[in-house]
Amino acid sequence: MAWLLDLDGVVWLAGVPIPGSVEAIAALREAGERVVFVTNNSSSPVAEQEGRLARIGIPAEGDVLTSAVAAAALLEPGETALVCAGPGVVEALERRGVHTVRDGEADAVVVGFHLDFDYERLRAAGVAVLAGARLIGTNDDATYPTPMGEIPGGGAILAAVAYAGGVEPVVAGKPFEPMAAAVRAMAGDGPHVMVGDRPSTDGRFARTLGCPFGLVLSGVTRADEPPVEPTPDLVAPDLATLVAQRQSST
């Protein structure tokens, strides 16, 4: 079985490990379980994400799947993409054989979370979409969890470009099928368990994959919030508690 773990809000908050997460992942691997990190954060290259995990004690080479990879699969080698996103998207597109630009004509505009988004980025992306480029978002998450609280996420940037261009974007990341196809390619058809902190993203992604959803309350979802859909199969304050509950019931 493969455990599919979201990163932000499950393993860490802006790179700061959530207490118990490192030990929980080690326990899963010691039990013979496959662990795959499935993140909608497309900003950083895969090797950088693997390195950040290694620095907190989690070996992860070959086990990280980002929404940038899923987005890149929606373009064909030889096409041109205008990148309104971070270096992780540039890396994924270029590995796919897609030519990347920051301005001008393009077959597609790819939007993801990045901290240097400004009006010039919005102008370039919006003009390309108005000229006929298709719009692809790495994800549509409205917010992004940090140790100081939530901040606007990649979905907020995508919404601005979509509104400027007057189109509906295709979204590659969780909970949509492009990311599910990428998971199947990396981890097989299952069985899987999806663990995340956002029912609207991680929970719906579990339903897309047809697997159980474990909700942790260490990210954007709080214990005092009203019931959410889809209903999680497991709920725990953090990954360590959820893993302990799951292992004790099997």
Image (tube, rainbow, N blue to C red):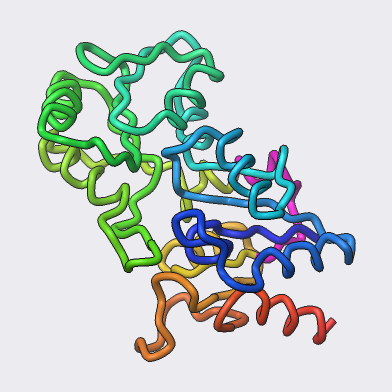
The quadrant in which residue 112 appears is top left
**Residue sitting nearer the eye, 240 or 209:** 240
Across the whole image, how many numbered discs are drawn on residues? 0
- Tell me what residue is drawn at x 44 percent, y 68 percent: 198
- Tell me what residue is drawn at x 80 percent, y 86 percent: 249
Q: Is residue 101 left or right of residue 236?
A: left
**Residue sitting nearer the eye, 189 or 112:** 112
Q: Is residue 240 left or right of residue 165?
A: right
Q: Is residue 178 left or right of residue 1?
A: left
Image quarter hosting the C terminus: bottom right
Q: Position of residue 237 (x, y in %)?
A: 55, 83
- Tell me what residue is drawn at x 41 percent, y 76 percent: 221
Q: Is residue 62 left or right of residue 17?
A: right
The quadrant in which residue 32 appears is bottom right
Is 124 magenta? The answer is no
Is 188 magenta? The answer is yes
Q: Position of residue 203 (x, y in %)?
A: 51, 68
Q: Position of residue 1 (x, y in %)?
A: 80, 61
- Tell me what residue is drawn at x 47 percent, y 22 percent: 93
User: Furthest-top residue in view?
Assistant: 78
Question: Is 179 located above or below residue 246 in the figure?
Answer: above
Residues in magenta? 181-193
Q: Position of residue 243 (x, y in %)?
A: 72, 76
